[in-house]
Amino acid sequence: MLLPESIQSLINSLERLPGIGPKSASRLAFYLLRATDEVSQDLATALANLKANTAFCQECFNITEAGRERCEICEATRRDGSLICVVEEALDVLALERTGGFQGKYHVLQGVLSPIEGIGPDDLKIKQLIARISSGGIKEVILATNPSMEGDATALYLRQQLEPLGVRVTRLASGLPVGGDLEYADEITLSQALEGRREM
Ligand SMILES: [Zn+2]
């Protein structure tokens, strides 16, 4: 049986989201079909506003409000601009900010190297990181990618790339769950990982 075009196209769109397979996509689509108008309307509005009202900081690639060139963290003069913490996603910035223990600045890669998913160095904000460091004033780069296979491989790649630039390169200490996500680490674990970062 063929589904009406509007349902099929919603299923197709949902299927493209990470972690959503065909079954989950169908379930969500049918849930939305049965839900009140308000539920689907809120979702539609949130999706439409997502791109319209946000932008990426042109310095660190964190999320910022549309129309702003630099995010609040990059613009904060009281923060230490000689220390850059490299993370995978903007959510990791939030997690580290919640610890309140980091006073440097960030660089959001917007992903990790993943040969399986066809994500190479050019798909991430690596060139921009190198350009930032090359422009001077940076003493230490903390590689805070997730303690996963991809996160470790990305950190290793970055260390090789950063070596000729003469900056100190450190990696978050272990204690973070292997294969885990920075985003879900509790504040104490994350604070300790930051505190105990080691040379790479
Ligand atoms: Zn920024």
Image (cartoon, rainbow, N blue to C red):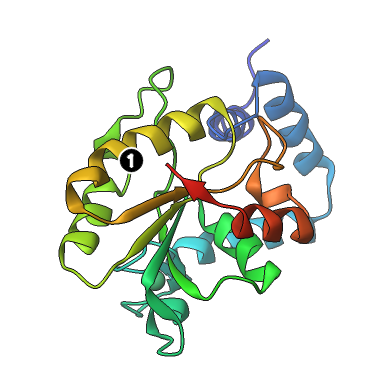
Specify the quadrant of the image occupied by residue 25: top right
Q: Considering depth in this image, is 191 or 119 the residue closer to the camera?
A: 191
Q: Is mark 1 within 8 Å of ligand 1?
A: no
Q: Residue 17 placed where, x, y %?
A: 57, 35
Which image quarter holds the C terminus?
top left
Residue in the picture at 46% in, 89% down: 78
Q: Is residue 88 visible?
A: no
179 versus 135 height, above or below: above
Label 1 sits on residue: 159
Tally the marks.
Answer: 1
Residue in the picture at 61% in, 53% down: 196
Q: Amino acid at mark 1?
A: Arg
Q: Residue 168 placed where, x, y %?
A: 34, 55
Residue in the picture at 69% in, 68% down: 99
Q: Residue 104 placed where, x, y %?
A: 46, 72
User: Is 66 left, or right, of 9 in this rendering?
Assistant: left
* Ligand 1 falls in quadrant: bottom left
Q: Considering depth in this image, is 15 or 87 the residue closer to the camera?
A: 87
Specify the quadrant of the image occupied by residue 65: bottom left
